[in-house]
Image (tube, grey):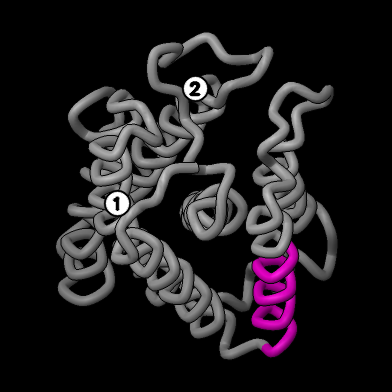
């Protein structure tokens, strides 16, 4: 992978640290949640730093291991007794703060595109509108948790729409990785995500944002 400015690596590392802190704080400073998060990040950091994911034409594609295990773990949480207890114990207001990370992430993605390591379709200049979820998150927090301006229905719709934005960019990102599954961005594939620390976006930040939406939707439906 070509050399990139140090600030881009620092940006994605800081985004990851922010996500870890928000998850830890929303879980009432759970040591188990923190340990599991750090262990997963270290494992994925070692794999991506050692270029394990550089082989994208093996079958099944190795890069699937970046996202799939974390997403499956999130799903399991919603169906296990311990997982349900953990979800019910979360401080939802604090968890909502994690959506703010989408702003610097989108800025970082745009910068990566300018260095030709991801396609522009993965940025707000292309078909990625996830930044709107990040920009609107502070207003949702203020209007729902602080000022009581927003209804449960409005916030539920915001979560569903923002989840859709997240799913759209994930699909586009996966279909842009150079592999037998690639159908998009053939002229400039998504390669940055295969390397450290950008791999942390796929293996941790995205699953936690996904998790935050599911928790909020579950709480809304349980009222």
Note whether 60 is above or below 5 in the view shown. Answer: above
Q: Where is residue 65 in the image (x, y as percent from the top left)?
A: 74, 43
Residue depicted at x 51% and y 60%:
197
The answer to whether mark 2 and mark 1 are in CB contact below 8 A is no
Please name whichever residue, 120 or 140, is drawn nearer the observer in this view of the structure: 120
**Mark sitting on residue 47:** none
**Is 191 part of what is drawn in magenta?**
no
Residue 204 visible: yes
Count of labels in the image: 2
Q: Position of residue 51 (x, y in %)?
A: 68, 48
Note whether 64 is above or below 22 in the view shown. Answer: above
Please name whichever residue, 207 or 200, is drawn nearer the observer in this view of the structure: 200
Q: How far apart are the two marked residues, 2 and 1, measured between alpha carbons?
A: 17 Å
- Which image quadrant is residue 39 in? bottom right
Please name whichever residue, 58 or 181, is drawn nearer the observer in this view of the structure: 58
Note whether 25 is above or below 169 in the view shown. Answer: below
Q: Main secondary structure of the magenta part?
A: helix
Residue depicted at x 20% and y 57%:
150
Q: Position of residue 210 (x, y in %)?
A: 52, 49
Q: Give the residue number, with chain letter if any, for mark 1.
A: 108
Please name whichever residue, 89 or 114, is drawn nearer the observer in this view of the structure: 114
Residue, far front: 3
10 Å crowding of disc 1: few (<14), some (14-19), many (20+): many
Horizontal arrangement in the rendering, residue 48 relative to residue 164 (left or right): right
Q: Give the residue number, with chain letter if any, for mark 2.
A: 176
**SS at mark 1 in the image:** helix
Residue depicted at x 65% and y 14%:
181
- The residue range painted magenta reads 31-43
**SS at mark 2 in the image:** loop
Q: Position of residue 69 (x, y in %)?
A: 76, 48
């Amino acid at each position: 992978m070509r050399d990139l400015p140090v600030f881009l690596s620092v940006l994605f590392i800081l985004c990851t640290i922010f996500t870890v802190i928000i998850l830890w704080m929303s879980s009432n400073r759970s040591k188990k949640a923190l340990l599991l998060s750090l262990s997963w990040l270290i494992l994925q950091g070692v794999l991506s730093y050692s270029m394990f994911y550089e082989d994208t034409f093996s079958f099944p594609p190795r890069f699937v291991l970046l996202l799939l295990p974390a997403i499956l773990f999130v799903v399991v949480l919603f169906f296990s007794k311990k997982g349900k207890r953990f979800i019910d114990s979360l401080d939802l207001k604090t968890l909502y703060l994690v959506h703010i990370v989408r702003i610097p992430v989108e800025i970082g993605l745009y910068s990566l595109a300018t260095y030709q390591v991801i396609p522009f379709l993965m940025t707000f200049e292309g078909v990625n509108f996830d930044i709107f979820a990040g920009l609107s998150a502070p207003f949702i927090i203020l209007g729902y948790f602080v000022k009581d301006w927003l209804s449960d229905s409005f916030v539920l719709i915001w979560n569903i729409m923002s989840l859709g934005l997240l799913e759209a960019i994930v699909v586009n990102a996966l279909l842009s990785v150079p592999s037998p599954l690639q159908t998009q961005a053939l002229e400039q594939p998504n390669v940055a995500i295969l390397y450290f620390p950008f791999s942390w976006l796929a293996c941790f930040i995205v699953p936690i944002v996904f998790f935050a939406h599911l928790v909020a939707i579950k709480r809304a439906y349980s009222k």
